[in-house]
Image (cartoon, grey):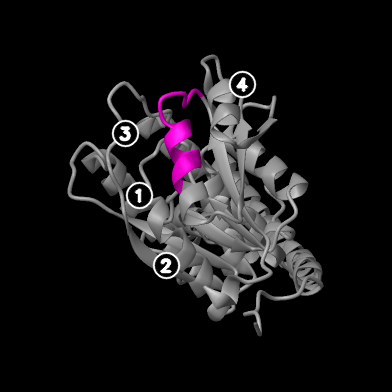
């Protein structure tokens, strides 16, 4: 583990009502990475999560704003480290591979390493969650290009330059989507490694709602599409408006050629309005595309201002 020498490693565990699992997570990561600091960020738990985490030896921070995205925002802002290992507080991920994942991050100079979930247990990774993950991951790949096979994994390793350049706009479970798109947008060096995924212990309940959170994730993808690729986003509206305008105008044009009259003036006005609206949308896309390129350049300068992860010479 020489390439982790002199590296400050922080284990970040976002928690909400995880009293049944938090002690095991803290102990497992302390065993695998004894020099790392384990931080438990509690998000208004109503059970004994805070007390149990402290007794297990974790450093506990509390985040009053509800939502995993708000927790991650505080994690990256408050904690100073060279390597950040983020894992969900449900004890479903394999802590024993954390040293290998951290070594790979440093050895290959990566900014994010995603632990993709591999499980043979139906209850651990339900069909609905698998299907939704594949659909959303595919949509992100269509819009933003190359992506991961498990975009929604809660087991990730980050470099310092990633953590300190991440804006963290999302509030809830859609934050994994934002984490992925941030890396794709800045074309960071990333990788993914298959990791074991197990069922929650008996009595532990998932906080993820398949349909509600799935819609929130989809909405986040659409918002990021508009924000990060405005020309493509508004061009779609432009083409829809122009096609509708031309479709409505063809019968009017045929009548005008035959009779020299335009009897359906409201339709003609609608065609003109649709055409103008389409041109306005295209203009917005062109202007915002220029603004977005400048914003991405500034984000990249902030990202490059932080040294890349590198192996120790020891």
In primary-sequence order, the first of circles 1 and 4 is 4
User: Residue at position x 50%, y 40% from top?
Assistant: 26
Mark 1 Cα shell of 10 Å, populated few (<14), some (14-19), many (≥20): some
Q: Looking at the image, which is closer to me, 175 or 38?
A: 38
Give the alpha-carbon distance from disc 2 to disc 3, as whole Å.
23 Å
Mark 4 Cα shell of 10 Å, populated few (<14), some (14-19), many (≥20): some
User: Residue at position x 39%, y 39% from top?
Assistant: 91
Give the alpha-carbon distance from disc 3 to disc 1, as whole Å.
19 Å
Residue 174 rendering spot, x and y as whole percentages: 52, 42
Local secondary structure at mark 3: loop
Q: Which residue is mark 4?
A: 44
Local secondary structure at mark 2: strand
Residue extending farthest to the bottom is 313
The label shown at residue 192 is 2
Q: Which residue is mark 1?
A: 133
Range covered by the magenta-colored residues: 17-28
Q: Which residue is mark 3?
A: 200
């Amino acid at each position: 583990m020489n390439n982790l020498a002199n590296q400050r490693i922080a284990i970040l565990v976002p928690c909400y009502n995880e009293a049944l699992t938090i002690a095991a997570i803290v102990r497992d990561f302390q065993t695998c990475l004894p020099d790392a600091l384990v931080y438990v960020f509690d998000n208004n738990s109503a059970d004994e999560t805070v007390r149990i985490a402290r007794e297990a030896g974790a450093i506990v921070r509390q985040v009053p704003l509800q939502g995993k995205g708000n927790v991650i925002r505080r994690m990256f802002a408050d904690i100073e480290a060279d390597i950040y290992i983020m894992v969900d507080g449900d004890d479903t991920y394999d802590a024993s591979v954390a040293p290998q994942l951290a070594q790979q991050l440093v050895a290959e100079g990566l900014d994010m390493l995603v632990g993709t979930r591999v499980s043979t247990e139906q209850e651990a990774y339900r069909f609905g969650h698998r299907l939704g993950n594949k659909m959303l991951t595919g949509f992100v790949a269509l819009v933003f290009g190359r992506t991961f096979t498990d975009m929604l994994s809660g087991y990730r390793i980050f470099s310092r330059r990633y953590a300190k350049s991440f804006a963290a706009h999302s509030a809830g479970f859609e934050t994994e989507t934002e984490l992925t798109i941030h890396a794709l947008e800045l074309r960071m060096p990333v990788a993914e490694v298959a990791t074991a995924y197990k069922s929650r212990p008996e009595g532990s309940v998932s906080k993820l709602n398949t349909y509600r959170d799935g819609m929130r994730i989809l909405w986040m993808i659409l918002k990021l599409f508009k924000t990060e690729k405005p020309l493509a986003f508004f061009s779609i509206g432009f083409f829809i408006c122009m096609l509708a305008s031309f479709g409505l105008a063809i019968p009017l044009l045929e009548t005008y050629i035959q009779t020299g009259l335009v009897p359906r003036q409201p339709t003609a006005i609608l065609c003109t309005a649709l055409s103008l609206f389409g041109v306005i949308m295209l203009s917005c896309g062109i202007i915002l595309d220029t603004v977005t390129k400048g914003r991405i350049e500034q984000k990249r300068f902030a990202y490059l201002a932080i040294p890349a992860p590198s192996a120790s010479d020891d």
